[in-house]
Amino acid sequence: MTFGPTSLLARTILTLAVSSLTIVAIAVAALQSFVVDPISEQSADDEAALLVLTAQTWVELPPEARPYFELELAEQHDLIVSTEEQSHPPVRYEEAPFVSMLEEKLNARLERPVAMAQGGDLIWATLPMAGYSLQIGFSATRRNVQPLYVGIVIAVLGAVVVLATSAVIVLRVTRPLVQAAEQADAFRGGANFDPLPERGPKELVVLARNFNTMAREISALLSNRTTLLGGISHDLKTPLTRMRLAVELLPDTVDPQLVQRLERNLESMDELIANALRFARGAHEAPQPVELAEFVKTLAASLDPTMPVDCMAPPEDKVSVAPGALTRVLTNLVTNAEQHGQSARMRLQGREIHVLDAGPGIPKAHREAVFQPFFRLDRSRSAKTGGSGLGLAIVHQLCQTHGWRIEITDGEGGGTDVCVAV
């Protein structure tokens, strides 16, 4: 079982996405280790030096100069100096990782523990200095590096840039491949196929040119084969008629059973030739717009006996089909259903035409093989139901020629449901 995307475009984009995110993760880790952490550590050391210098300067100043110094600190450095002991809750280090690093730097400089507290929007550091216990407050967001947010921004922006660039490159490469795959899937050997544009990189131009050459050669081969088949079948009509006339002119002394065998062989030959001619005419027929619901109803009314048609949500617009080929396809399917099923009916649902029977059904193992020429199930080899073995083969060939989809499934109440989607 295959997991994940199946198209070349989706797989390529997924591969580029994974690789780009891996590169971004490595870049963020390197940025954290070699840039953010050293800068944060240096910033915490500088901040600790500023706080210690502030406390030392405040202690050395005369009392009358200290208010001016405190005002200048507040205006220039956003520092608040207080000699009154204030009770504040301890700092939540998970919200301010820079404060933890700052505390370590202060402890190292003063060689004694420094209490850190949080009051309002300020972080208060209690510094013992020359008999004083100074509390210096600074903003809780002061030099607070957010490596997670930085990493997210880098990852998102980097991934967007890489994916956008990769998508442009991938689309330029995969779009012609997707177009070639669609053309190859839609190609049924007809002469009116749309050639692939021969432009782009050299490899894609070579691929498109070879596909167009192959398609033209296959179309010519199939056209010649159909023309040859039609010509031979048409030319065989004359000697077959002569043989019929010769049988009719046989004297009465000839064994009647021999005459009957000759007539049955001539009828089989006539049926084979008629099937070949019908296929040749249907393969060369040009499509034209038809009202599908009206077309199916008219066809069902022309059958003997008349077949019921259940129209469930027929298409509102006209459908472009080859009417003669579609008539041959549906007629063969109905004939096959009447021969091997207890009853047959038709149902139109959108652009899907279903031919249903209440017979024993077709085993799943044989649902592909029944479209092969001269393949017949064991139960169809009796004289009553036996045919030329070309009915479903002609149906399959005409569907392939005109780009129709044919599928055999189990009927709702048993039997077989053969669906032709035009």
Image (spheres, rainbow, N blue to C red):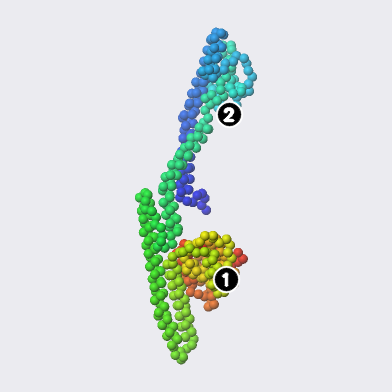
Q: Nearer the viewer, residue 200 or 141?
A: 200
- Residue at 50% x, 62% y: name it: 319
Which corner quadrant of the image does residue 214 belong to? bottom left
Marks 1/2: CA–CA distance: 81 Å
- Residue furthest toward the bottom? 253
Q: Is residue 148 above or below residue 172?
A: above
Say if residue 190 shows up in the picture. yes
> Where residue 38 is drawn, which disc sits there?
none
Classify 10 Å Cα crowding around label 2: few (below 14), some (14-19), many (20 and above): few
Kind of residue sitting beneath label 2 = Glu
Residue at image mark 1: 307
- Secondary structure type for disc 1: loop
Q: Is residue 105 above or below residue 131?
A: below
Q: Is residue 139 above or below residue 25?
A: above
* Residue 166 image position (x, y, % from top left): 44, 43
Q: Nearer the viewer, residue 57 or 70?
A: 70
Q: Are marks 1 and 2 in contact (CB under 8 Å)?
A: no
- 131 horizontally vs 185: left or right: right
